[in-house]
Amino acid sequence: MSQEFFLYKGRPLVRLQDTIYYGRMSDPYVVMFQIKSHRELKGLTAADEISIQMMATDLSLPPQKLIAKRADRHGLYQALDIASVWLDRECGPAC
């Protein structure tokens, strides 16, 4: 039985509460989003402040080298946009 995930620009998004992972664990890097705050938008709750970290999937690396990039953005779209650019630059759109 295969499990399907929501995709953004061809990469899977997996969410557990206020943490979202973007990318495949089989690739060199994935991006972790941590939703720091929410806001009300037309009667719905939306992510507001998001902390972004691009992390290496190679767990044999020392802990200080696991996080390759960090940023903060307002809104999920801006966070996904920068994460997609980071992953494209590191390993191309096939990653």
Image (cartoon, rainbow, N blue to C red):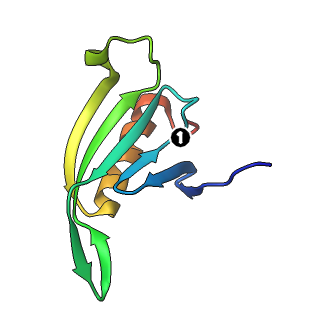
Q: Residue at x 25, y 17 (%)?
A: 64
Task: Give the quadrant of the C terminus.
Answer: top right
Callout 1: SS: loop
Q: Nearer the viewer, residue 2 or 55?
A: 2
Residue to which mark 1 is pinned = 93
Rendered location of residue 35, percent (x, y):
27, 56
Give the residue displayed 30% in from the left and 27% down from the top: 67
Q: Residue at x 80, y 49 (%)?
A: 1
**Which residue is more in the foreground, 40 or 79?**
40
Horizontal side of 76 relative to 9 (left or right) equals: left
Task: Name the residue located 39 percent from the left edge and 40 percent from the top edge.
Answer: 31
84 in relation to 55, above or below: below
Instruction: Name the amino acid, label 1.
Output: Pro
**Residue found at the far right of this picture:** 1
Above or below for 69 versus 16:
above
Extreme front residue here? 17
Left or right: 26 as drawn, with respect to 42: right
| Residue 49 on image: x %, y % | 20, 59
Position in image of residue 5 (x %, y %): 61, 55
